[in-house]
Image: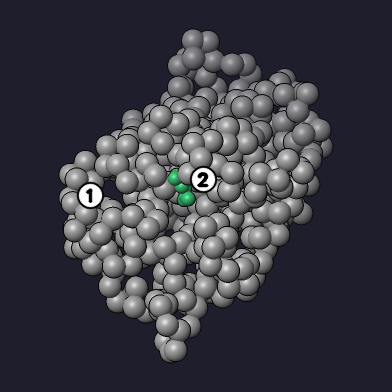
């Protein structure tokens, strides 16, 4: 996207997630129904909620006031009552107009010269119509704005198309312009127009041009087009070279891979045999390709003939380590307990563990896939904190699909990856589950990677055979 959308998301996103306080929202405009969602969301976030404009009369009525001929959204009175109650329960100070500029009728044409007077907002005479906020209200609202450190303003305070009824809206724009310590966000065509007309535009932090989308953003609605841009789970294409390639062959493959996948859209990781790490790391230097190991020991050093210690990998420049691959479990006595020890160790030295899990064909046929995976991962993740878990990678690799050419269907793979994410949410929290990357592995190739990676809970692949072919792995790295 462009810089304008970026600014919109940065400024409004910060206001919603971590505003400097006091945080004041000023809402105006004619209809309550247009702003219900915004009020409901902001009421959980702001310190003060200021309501002016036509919509204020429904709130005044809900509080038992007399509003004369002023605009009333009769069907929304109960809702207004519940919003007033919610504000109270959340400790949000609700500011409504104290006094109101009234006329005998709505100006015709809109900019007609009309006679006005100011009356208390809760006692508007039966034959009068409130069309702007009065002087006391301007004072009170301006004071709230002056004290604020974050202000969101959406909707005019009166019929600002008529100069006589524009004073409230102008005063609010002026108060915002005067507060140079606050982050000021103007949303909605009318308030933005008022600010532009008055020449205050450059005094505001941000004037939203997002229209309805910005309102939805303030309502807390997920905007799919934005959500996918903000997706923190960049896909990861991880190559597990297994026991293939000599150092010279590995260097040649890497050279090819760097040329083809050096700028791939996904994160890219290759995990060659230990003795090839040096050559592969040299070739990967300065590119986006990360290098991992296929295993490690959980001890720092000692009499463990044939083993490799975590700090040896770290010193070389390795960033990731595959742990608990089913081939290691099957042929080399790896257990859930050793996987857990290794994962804890990897995290303690700063290596990212890629923890593998997966069921056998018999287990799938017995219908115990999910239970089995949950058990494997519960043991593997024991003692790992939420913060650590958010950064690790889990690879779901059904054993029956590894190296067999049999891929799990997209749905089968996603079902288990979703169950893994649900388990992470259960063990930790939704945030951690949203961040952890879950890969699918098992006969991933250039022909099926795009569809697999498009599934909701599949964040990439752990790829064996196809990672040894630069062209195929390049396709996967861009899927
Ligand atoms: P495969 O291997 O892609 O050759 O099936 C996957 C793996 O074992 O990680």
**131 on left or right of 123:** left
Q: Secondary structure at mark 1?
A: helix
267 or 133: which is nearer to us? Answer: 267
174 or 292: which is nearer to us? Answer: 292
Which residue is the site of mark 2? 402
Reply above or below: 77 against 227: above
Q: CA–CA distance between discs 2 and 1?
A: 22 Å
**102 on left or right of 350:** right
Reply above or below: 279 against 256: below
Counting from the top left corner in percent of width and height, residue 374 is at 69, 56
**437 on left or right of 418:** left
Badge 2, how many Cα within 10 Å: few under 14, some, many 20+? Answer: many
Counting from the top left corner in percent of width and height, residue 308 is at 39, 76
> Decide: marks 2, 1 in contact (CB < 8 A)?
no
Q: Residue at x 34, y 62 (%)?
A: 273
Counting from the top left corner in percent of width and height, residue 467 is at 35, 45
Q: Residue at x 75, y 47 (%)?
A: 368
Which residue is the site of mark 1? 253
């Amino acid at each position: 996207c462009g810089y304008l959308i970026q600014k919109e998301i940065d400024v409004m996103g910060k206001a919603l997630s971590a505003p400097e306080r006091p945080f004041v929202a000023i809402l105006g405009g004619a209809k309550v129904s247009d702003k219900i969602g915004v009020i409901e969301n902001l009421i959980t976030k702001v310190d003060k909620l200021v309501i002016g404009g036509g919509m204020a009369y429904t709130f005044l009525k809900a509080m038992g006031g007399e509003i004369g001929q002023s605009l009333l959204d009769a069907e929304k009175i109960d809702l207004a009552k519940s919003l007033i109650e919610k504000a109270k329960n959340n400790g949000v100070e609700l500011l409504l107009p104290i006094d109101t500029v009234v006329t005998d009728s709505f100006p015709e044409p809109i900019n007609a010269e009309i006679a006005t007077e100011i009356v208390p907002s809760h006692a508007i005479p039966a034959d009068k119509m409130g069309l702007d906020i009065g002087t006391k209200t301007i004072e009170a609202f301006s004071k709230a704005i002056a004290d604020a450190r974050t202000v969101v303003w959406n909707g005019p305070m009166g019929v600002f198309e008529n100069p006589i009824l524009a004073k409230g809206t102008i005063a609010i724009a002026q108060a915002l312009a005067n507060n140079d310590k606050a982050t000021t966000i103007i949303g909605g065509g009318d308030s933005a127009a008022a600010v532009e007309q008055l020449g205050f535009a450059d005094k505001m932090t941000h004037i939203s041009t997002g229209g309805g989308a910005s309102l939805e953003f303030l309502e807390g609605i997920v905007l799919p087009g934005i959500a996918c841009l903000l997706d923190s789970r960049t896909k990861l294409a991880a190559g597990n070279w297994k026991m293939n390639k000599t150092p010279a062959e590995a260097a040649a493959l890497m050279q090819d891979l760097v040329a083809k996948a050096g700028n791939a859209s996904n994160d890219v990781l290759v995990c060659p045999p230990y003795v090839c790490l040096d050559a592969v790391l040299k070739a990967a230097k300065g590119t986006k390709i990360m290098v991992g190991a296929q295993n490690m020991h959980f001890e720092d050093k000692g009499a463990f003939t044939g083993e490799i210690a975590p700090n040896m990998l770290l010193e070389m420049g390795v960033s990731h380590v595959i742990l608990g691959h089913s081939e290691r479990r099957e042929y080399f006595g790896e257990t859930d307990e050793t996987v857990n020890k290794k994962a804890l160790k990897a995290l303690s030295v700063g290596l990212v563990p890629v923890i593998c899990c997966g069921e056998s064909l018999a287990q799938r046929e017995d219908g115990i896939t999910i239970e089995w995976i949950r058990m494997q991962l519960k043991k593997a993740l024991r003692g790992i904190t939420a913060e650590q878990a958010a950064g690790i990678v889990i690879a779901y690799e059904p054993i029956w699909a590894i190296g067999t050419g049999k891929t799990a269907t997209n749905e089968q793979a996603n079902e288990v990856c979703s169950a893994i994410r649900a388990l992470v949410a259960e063990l930790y929290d939704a945030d951690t589950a949203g961040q952890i990357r879950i890969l699918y592995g098992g006969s991933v190739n250039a022909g099926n990677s795009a569809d697999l990676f498009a599934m909701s809970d599949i964040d990439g692949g752990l790829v064996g055979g196809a990672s040894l072919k630069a062209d195929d792995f390049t396709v996967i790295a861009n899927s």
